[in-house]
Amino acid sequence: MQVTNLARDKDDLVHRLHQDNSTDSDRLRNVQKENVTLNHRVSRHLFIPRMLSIVCAYFTFGEQVKSLLNELDELRGQREKLGLESDHVLRLQSKQMTEFQANVRALEVRQLLVACCSCVLTMAHEWDVLIRS
């Protein structure tokens, strides 16, 4: 069950990572379109305050990209940690399964020994009855 939860969490992280990448592409396209539009306006009107707002938007976008890259690194670290935890759980479950199988075999052998002893005792009792009669 833990492996299933970890796999689901991993899938959620991958899905989120893909969403972030597509969102980044959409933002980049929107900023590029706005940049073209603003460049056209600036070249027509030579409006310097508008040019300053474009520069500010560019730096803000750069900060957003840095923030997203940091978040991406964090998600990659979490994904690696979850992968290691998943491997550990898998090894632990494999070890437990091996121990369980060994215990089952030991119980089966014990059951066979009890059955054999029961047969031997029954035969000994029958021989004893035959000898006394």
Image (cartoon, grey):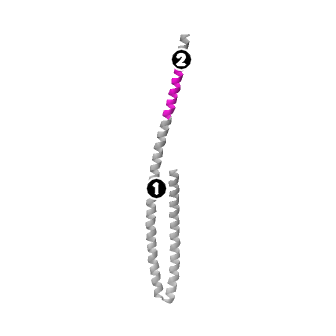
Residue visible at 55% across and 16% down in the picture: 126
Residue 90 image position (x, y, % from top left): 47, 48
Q: Farthest residue toward the bottom?
A: 45
Q: The disc labelled 2 sits on which kind of residue?
A: His
Looking at the picture, tell me which residue is in the foreground, 20 or 41. Answer: 20
Q: Which mark is residue 125?
A: 2
Residue 51 image position (x, y, % from top left): 46, 84
Residue visible at 51% across and 88% down in the picture: 44
Q: Nearer the viewer, mark 1 or mark 2?
A: 2
* Residue 117 on the magenta span: yes
Residue visible at 50% across and 70% down in the picture: 24
Start and end of the magenta stretch? Answer: 105-124
Classify residue 65 by image quadrant.
Answer: bottom left
56 in relation to 75, above or below: below
Count of residue discs: 2
Answer whether labels 1 and 2 touch (C-beta < 8 Å).
Answer: no
Q: The disc labelled 1 sits on which kind of residue?
A: Leu
Residue 123 image position (x, y, % from top left): 54, 18
* Residue 107 on the magenta span: yes
Quadrant assignment for the C terminus: top right
Residue visible at 49% across and 42% down in the picture: 97
Dot 1: few (<14), some (14–19), or many (≥20) neighbours within 10 Å?
Answer: some
Label 1: which residue? 82
Secondary structure beneath disc 1?
Answer: helix
